Amino acid sequence: MKKKPDWSYQKTAIEQTFKKFTNSNGSKLGIFIPTGGGKTRIGLSIALKLLLRNKNEKNKNILWITNRKHLKTSGKNDLKEILAEKKVDSRTIKSIERKFEFLVVNSMDNYLKQHTLSNTELIVIDEAHHSAAPSYEKIKRSEKNLLFLTATPVRTDGLSLGLDEVSFQISYRQLFERNVIIEPTFEKPIILPKSGTWDGEKENAILIKSFMSLCENYRKRYKKIIFVMNRVKDINCLFESLERINENSEIRIENISLEKDICFIHGSDNSFKRIDKSYNTNKALDLFKKRKNCILFTTKDLIGEGFNDPMVDTIVVTYPAGSILQLMQISGRALRYADNKDHAFIIQTKHSEIEYHFEQRWLYQDISDRPRPRLLDYSYHSNADLITKCDDLLLQHNIADSYLNRLRTKIGKVKEGEDISILFCGLKYDERLHASDFSKKGKYVAIFIDQQNRNECIKIFNTFCENLDINKSHLINLYLKNEDPLIEEKRPNYQDMLYAIEKACSEVEGVPEFEEKNRNYNNDKGKGTTFLTYVTFTHEKLLNQELGRFLSDCENKEQILEKIYNPSLQFSSVIKIPNYIDGNLAFLLTKKQTEWLHANIELLKTHIHNARRNGLRFYEGITSYQNNLVESVLPLPIILRLEFFINNGSTMIFSLETFDDDYPKNVRIPRNRNKAK
């Protein structure tokens, strides 16, 4: 049975970002989620929460900025869907929609001439990797909260987006594991002509041959295919060739109709105009989406951003990679989840290396991807847990004893809650050893990276990746400070790092002179080089699983957990009540409040029972209870929803009394709060 997607990360992204915005003003936060992960819905949900927290401020609005007209329309449609799912009445929907202003960035100047931003609660920049452009400067200089949404935050020109902080990010790998998007199969690549283009009869014939080979499995293996071309000229040339084939009965493609199965769409023309000349680009794309099986020829610019058809299962990339991030975004169009879709396929030119980037966590890395380092993510919940996980990795990488003790000392001094990294740099592998032994006998050095040396280490790494011919000693001396007490320890570490980068580049770029052929790189290219592994450790609080499930639908989950973790506060239970529009709202209660709650639930039951006995309705019993209430130790929202606990007490009240610090998967909430953590 096909597993359903786990979308729970969206709630985490919403809660984390909402909390950061409510605790500050003028923040610039980024959310980085791959294509198909729902970043637009997350952005809209955050905007809704910010609007609804200030219900009395009726003039507040949201400014949503994107770079294309169809993305503006898409944002509006997504907002309608979210409000419809929440079963909001039509009057409220219209009221909320009026508070959202969806704009294309080139219309911003006119908007700002006619409006001030004084009532703007949040500015959302969709496809934010474009926001380094000058057209976004006025908005980015505003003192309003800004939310940057993108699937590809790293720009090829290296310009910064201008963020204060990344509020949430998730990788392709994590979304594969959650069944949110489908992990692609990389089919046999198309061999790109030496010219690098499809100009000329010979080159065109190569692409036609690849197309006809693909058609043999059309409807069987590949259901809905998009050929992504670099130029409009290539599309027109290819389609003309297909028309000639269609007219030639001797080489007709079996089971394929040029009219019903094949179409082309680009900015200035589309094949649907042969049916109706009024069909523009957007209408043509809508017609393609409605087809169950179809083959589309289009440009990278047209479907690179904002195009959403979950039934597309095959992407054919017909040009060499100029921007690996754009290539990932285009390929991601085939990965979207659909109930009756089980596979996704990517066919690329031989020069492209998308597979590595999908396999690795390559969304917002601080190190260059040129040497294709392997990326590993770990979380830890205590210092002991961190030490254990680091030690396992150090032993797996055969770190020499002279380094081992020094590294263990540094790891042991990490403050709980701090994020650290370890960069493993490969040493020369003995040519006499067999390739099958590399995983066990390959040796590395390890560089410990924390806030003290991160900037220095990353700058040396990235500068060398940009220019491998630079003098290594000069580069290291450029960033090391003479007064640094660890300078003599760092210098050889950085020399080893630069050696590993140099060898990694030779390995992944297939340099003929590369001598270490026995490291098994060719068997596992998707995982990256064998010379560099970058491991990141992030701290996560250990959460009792039952409590986690109880709070999973509460919009203030993070705030509640913070209070539970606070050893100076004492609570007896946590309860939840239905929230306005969506989800639940949680409250922490002391022992006195918990006892009062249970007593008044019983009292409310009595009032309802007496009302019914006297021929009155259920709600009249509630009114009777509220009218007779003299005082309350609970917040008013709980009193107004007390009836929810009558039949749902077991699911709406969670006792904290039964947990102690020895509970196997616990939160630090119990009675013995002074124990060592």
Image: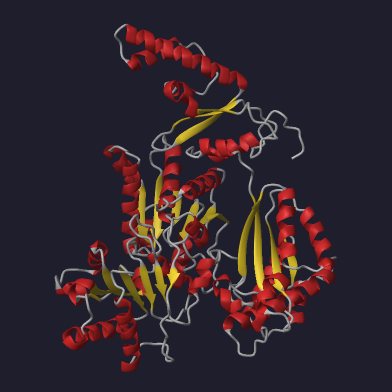
- Image quarter (top left, top right, bottom left or bottom right) of the C terminus: top right
At 56% from the left edge and 41% from the top edge, which residue is drawn? Answer: 558
| x and y, in percent, of residue 456 in the image | 72, 68
297 horizontally vs 638: left or right: left
617 horizontally vs 400: left or right: left
Res. 119 visible in picture: no
Placement of 164 over or under 266, stated as above or below: above
At 51% from the left edge and 73% from the top edge, which residue is drawn? Answer: 156
Q: How many marks?
A: 0
| x and y, in percent, of residue 471 in the image | 73, 84
Quadrant for residue 491, please give it.
Answer: bottom right
| x and y, in percent, of residue 435 in the image | 66, 78
23 horizontally vs 342: left or right: right
Along the line of sight, the residue nearer the viewer: 60 or 161: 161
Quadrant for residue 464, please give it.
Answer: bottom right
Placement of 559 over or under 312, stated as above or below: above
| x and y, in percent, of residue 149 in the image | 46, 58
Res. 407 visible in picture: yes
At 47% from the left edge and 17% from the top edge, which residue is drawn? Answer: 601
Q: Residue pushed farthest top? A: 614
86 horizontally vs 278: left or right: right
Color encoding of the figure? secondary structure
At 76% from the left edge and 34% from the top edge, which residue is drawn? Answer: 675
Placement of 156 over or under 205, stated as above or below: above
Quadrant for residue 477, please give it.
Answer: bottom right
